[in-house]
Amino acid sequence: AERGKPYFASADTMFRAALASKPDSADALAGLTATALLENRLVDATRFGESAAAAQPDSAVAQIALASALTAQSRLDKTGTGDILVRARAASDRAIAIAPSLQGRAVSRPSELWKFLAGAGRTPIIAAPR
């Protein structure tokens, strides 16, 4: 991730500027979720993902952001209850219901979130991470 760090920092700055312009922008919040995930800032990613889904519940990208963040956050879940993964799965299911073309894709992966954002023209011109 070190190699891509300057690109993610630049993207993060652009998403923050977009959010400053439109504080309830699910796209900007989803973008911030992606950059936080790709920089392994899981608490920030979860906060941004939850905000994206709350700002626009009928947005596939917001639901993908939430699913990605919760899936990553579940790795830190010490309770063992699986509640976080249940929430992640529900967000993934909502994303697929909104955008059926997502069926069969690993929508809870950070790289998929980035590709979805880029495919919809919602990211700065930066290649998806490998």
Image (spheres, rainbow, N blue to C red):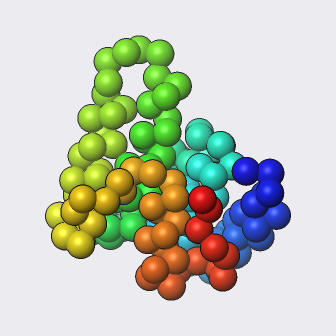
The C terminus lies in which quarter of the figure? Answer: bottom right
* Residue 64 in sight: yes
Q: Is residue 1 left or right of residue 29?
A: right
Q: Residue 114, how many percent across, how many down?
A: 52, 66
Q: Is residue 105 left or right of residue 51?
A: left
Check the image and report above or below for 65 versus 39: below
Check the image and report above or below for 124 versus 61: below
Check the image and report above or below for 130 versus 85: below
The part of the image, by quadrant, that contains residue 88 is top left
Of residues 2 and 92, which is closer to you in this image? 2
Of residues 13 and 40, which is closer to you in this image? 40
* Residue 30 in sight: no
Q: Residue 80, how many percent across, how many down?
A: 37, 15
Which residue shows up at 32% across the image and 18% down it? 81
Q: Residue 102, how many percent across, how many down?
A: 27, 66
Check the image and report above or below for 94 versus 46: below
The part of the image, by quadrant, that contains residue 42 is top right
Which residue shows up at 59% across the image and 68% down it? 128
Q: Residue 96, how many percent across, how many down?
A: 22, 62
Q: Is residue 100 left or right of residue 50?
A: left
Of residues 11 and 2, which is closer to you in this image? 2
